[in-house]
Image (cartoon, rainbow, N blue to C red):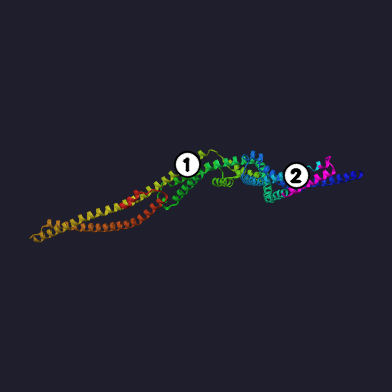
Amino acid sequence: KEKEKLLANLYNKLITYVSEKIDKNLDSLYFISKSESMISEFEDTFKAGTEASRENSSITADYARYSNLQIIDIKSKYDYKITELKKYLNQLKVLISPMKDLYNLNSLQKDQRDSVRSIRSSNSSPQEKVSALLNFLSKIKEENGTVLENFKNIERYYEQGKPLKGTLEGLIKMIKTYEQDIVNLIDNEKHNRSYKDDIKNKIIYITEKTDAIKDIIPLNEEVDNIIKQIEKLFNEDLFHEGLPNMEKLKKEKEKIKATIKSLNTNFYDGDLKELVDDMLNFVYKHSDFYDQAYAKGDVVNLQKEAEQEYEKITKLKSNNIPQMLKDLKSESKNLSELKDTMMDEMLNNVHQDISNVFEQIRNKYKDITTSLSAYKEDKQKFEKFKVDMIQTKNDLLGSLQQNDKKLSEANNMYEEFLAHIDTTTNREKQMYNQANALKENLANVQSKISSYQGKIEKLKAHTRKNYEKIKTLLQTF
């Protein structure tokens, strides 16, 4: 009996030892820990990816209110990476599901074999315990092929998912970086927003003012152009030839110039065009500033620059731009009327000059025609004298006795004839001189016509008028 008892104790110790070994390695036999480790890796990645795919609530709340082009750009990349992340998470999920199914099969098999502890604790005889233990080992051996196949499939899915896991981890890291960048940029934009709003208001004010002032500049240029035209007219030789009101017109021109200068000086004491150009350049340079991202120091510097430009525009001595435009237009009209007055006086002067020359020619022509008529009468008298003298001569020669009376008449006739010859000779000389004078005047007028035509061209260079009155006068002549 002692031997049986000793043998029984030995069996029990052996069974306990073997069963404990089996129990200890049961997880390993069914690849439980390894399977759990691989699945856990993927599930941890899936969980981290799922959390990363949920958009940050603070970003969602502030993005619409505090945004700029840099934030929009990063947010676009952020959204794209989240879309990619979700796509790859679905792919990982497809791998995790069969891995867990296979793991569950092996785990179920392992749980069914978990009864090795009951063998140790049973009240069966050592022989029965040995038999049960051998039966248990036989079952494990039978299941080993299926368990191993399941584990190999888990490993295969794991190998397939490793690159995907790496991609997901990279995306998660990138998304977190983008997310932090967006949060930082939004915080920066919140800080800058008050500066930006101030700059925006100043740019709006500058734009409104320059848009209104821009209309003054071409009006000033128009005025300057008219003044130059008037001064050029004063410098033309044409206008120094008998223009009675030239000094009066010059004084009027200087008076209008002084008024225009006073208007501009009282409006802005400086170069208005340069001011507007500076303002427009500033506005154009920073036209999209509100959408840009700025470092805190940079936005402060931009605000200072905006303040400087704003102060320039506020230095305008008058904000009544409509009145300034009205006054300038009025003075521009006065200048145009002055120019027209000058042109009309020049026209009248040229017309009078031409008319005087033509009148002189007409008078000389009239003188020579009068002399010619008188000469014709003298010639008729001369012929009558010849007839009368021949008749008197014949009467005297045919008379047998001397007749004192007839001799006296003949003598008087001869004296009168001699006097008439002198008158006719003088008239011939006068006609000759008159003809030469008329010829000389005609030659002078021919040269003057070219001069007048040149003057008309000068007038036309300063106005759109055609001066048909003078043209007709020249053509008539």
- Quarter of the picture containing the N terminus is top right
Instruction: Find residue 109 and report its image quarter.
Output: top right
Q: Position of residue 70 (x, y in %)?
A: 63, 46
Mark 1–mark 2 distance (CA, rounded to whole Å): 104 Å
- Residue range of the region highlighted in magenta in the rendering: 119-145
Q: Which mark is residue 167?
A: none
> Is residue 45 something that shows in the picture?
no
Q: How many marks?
A: 2
The crowd level at tag 2 (other Cα within 10 Å; few <14, some 14-19, many 20+) is: many
Most common secondary structure along the magenta stretch: helix
For residue 167, side relative to residue 456 (left or right) = right
Kindly identify the amino acid type of the residue bearing the numbered disc 2.
Answer: Lys
Residue found at the far front of this picture: 1
Q: Secondary structure at mark 2?
A: helix
Q: Identify which residue, 208 or 417, lies in the foreground.
A: 208
Disc on the earlier residue, 1 or 2: 2
Query: Residue at horizontal 36%, vertical 56%?
Result: 450
Please name the residue that numbered disc 1 is placed on.
329
* Residue found at the far right of this picture: 2
Q: Is residue 357 left or right of residue 316?
A: left
> Label 1 amino acid?
Lys
Q: Secondary structure at mark 1?
A: helix
In percent of width and height, residue 212 lies at: 52, 41
Q: Residue under circle 2?
A: 110
